[in-house]
Image: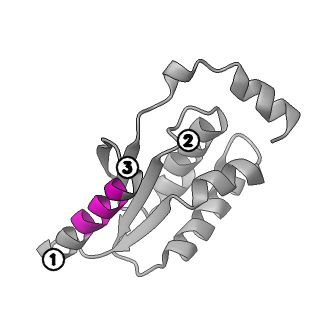
Amino acid sequence: MSQELSSTRQSRDSSRKAPPTIIVIFGASGDLTARKLLPGLYNLGFDDLLSEHFHLIGYGRSEMSDEAFRQSMQDAIRKHSRRPLNEEIWGQMSGNLHYHAGPYDAPDSFDRLSKRIGAIESSIGTETQCLFYVSTP
């Protein structure tokens, strides 16, 4: 970890960190996620304010792999974040970004989403809060 980043993180009060959290963003392939939401979450990670058990599931109608979603979000951070992309921070964060494609009117897609959330919660192994953000027109 770089000296500057290490000293910044050591000065943070650990009680300010969020508990284990899963955020689901509906409409994640859209402009708001790329311009505002992901850069904002990246900056929270840069400031060491996200839980080490932070996961994000982007939900959208567009077909996309987890890796393609991560690449899209990395590009968005490079373009829209107030800070330059730090490879160390991005490396810690990117593995916890997931994408789930599906229509908004199909119950089976939400059943699959629920199972995916459950699998992430099981992998964390502790109580997890789940937040839902609707970013659709």
Say which residue label 1 marks: 108
Say which residue label 2 marks: 40
Q: Are marks 3 and 2 in contact (CB under 8 Å)?
A: no
Would residue 54 be found to the left or right of residue 80 on screen? left
Please identify the residue farthest to the left as the structure is shown.
107
Q: Which mark is residue 9?
A: none
Kind of residue at badge 3: Ile
Q: Earlier in the sequence, mark 1 or mark 2?
A: 2
Crowding at dot 1, Cα within 10 Å, few <14 / some 14-19 / many 20+, comes out as: few
| Colour basis | one colour
Kind of residue at badge 2: Gly
Kind of residue at badge 1: Asp
SS at mark 2? helix
Would residue 66 be found to the left or right of residue 6 on screen? left
Say which residue label 3 marks: 23
State which region is magenta: 113-122
Above/below status of 95 relative to 47: below
Please identify the residue farthest to the front as the structure is shown.
125
Foreground label between 1 and 2: 1
Tell me residue 110's x, y (percent): 20, 68
Q: Tell me the quarter of the image containing the C terminus.
A: bottom left
Q: Earlier in the sequence, mark 1 or mark 3?
A: 3
Q: Residue placed at 71% from the left, 55% from the top?
A: 78
Q: Nearer the viewer, residue 123 or 62?
A: 123
Q: Residue placed at 33% from the left, 57% from the top?
A: 122
Above/below status of 3 relative to 120: above
Quadrant of the image occupied by residue 118 = bottom left
Q: Tell me the quarter of the image containing the N terminus.
A: top right
Tell me residue 55's x, y (percent): 45, 52
